Image (tube, rainbow, N blue to C red):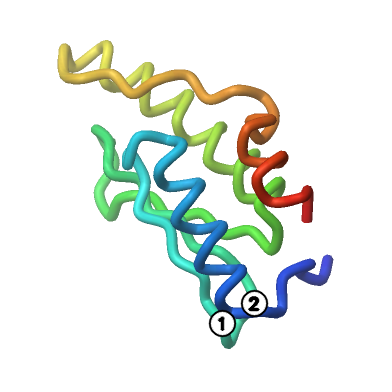
C-alpha cells in the first residue's frame, strides 16, 4: 500500500477543495484525516445504482481514478442526452501543481 504524502489535515483539505474546483464541482471531494486519503463522490449522470466513490492517497492517484470514472460518465451522459461532464486531462493540471509546490 502506498503511503500518503499528505499528513497535515489543512493541506489535505486544501488539495480536496482545489481539485473539486478544478473539475467544476462534478465531484464532491473530501480529505479523510484519519484514513489519510481523499474520497471523491461523482455528481454526474450514472446509470448504475449506488453512485460512484473513488479514493486515493495522493492527488495524482485520485485524479487518475476520477478520470476513469468521468470518461465512463461522459459516455453514459451522451447516451442519456443529459449534461456531459468535461474531459479531464491525463495528469493533474499544471496550474494546481504550481500553486501547491507539487506534493
**Label drawn at residue 33:** 1
* Residue 49 sits above or below residue 37 on the image: above
The image quadrant where one finds the N terminus is bottom right
Left or right of 70? Residue 89 is right
Q: To which residue does mark 2 refer? A: 36
Q: Quadrant of residue 76?
A: top left
Residue drawn at the location 72% of the way across and 70% of the way down: 6
Nearest the viewer among 59 and 97 is 97
Left or right of 4? Residue 34 is left
Nearest the viewer among 16 and 78 is 16
Q: Residues within 10 Å of mark 1 (few under 14, many from 20)?
A: some
**Percent coordinates x, y for residue 5 in the rendering:** 79, 67
* Residue 45 sits above or below residue 31 on the image: above
The image quadrant where one finds the C terminus is bottom right
**Percent coordinates x, y for residue 32 in the rendering:** 52, 76
Q: Residue at the far right: name it.
A: 2
Q: What element carries label 1?
A: loop
Amino acid at each position: 500500500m502506498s503511503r500518503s504524502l499528505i499528513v497535515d489535515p489543512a493541506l489535505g483539505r486544501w488539495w480536496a477543495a482545489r481539485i473539486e474546483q478544478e473539475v467544476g464541482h462534478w465531484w464532491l471531494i473530501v480529505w479523510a484525516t484519519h484514513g489519510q486519503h481523499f474520497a471523491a463522490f461523482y455528481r454526474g449522470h450514472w446509470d448504475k445504482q449506488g453512485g460512484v466513490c473513488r479514493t486515493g492517497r495522493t492527488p495524482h492517484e485520485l485524479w487518475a481514478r476520477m478520470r476513469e470514472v468521468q470518461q465512463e460518465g461522459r459516455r453514459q451522459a451522451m447516451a442519456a442526452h443529459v449534461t456531459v461532464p468535461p474531459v479531464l486531462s491525463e495528469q493533474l493540471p499544471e496550474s494546481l501543481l504550481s500553486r501547491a509546490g507539487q506534493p
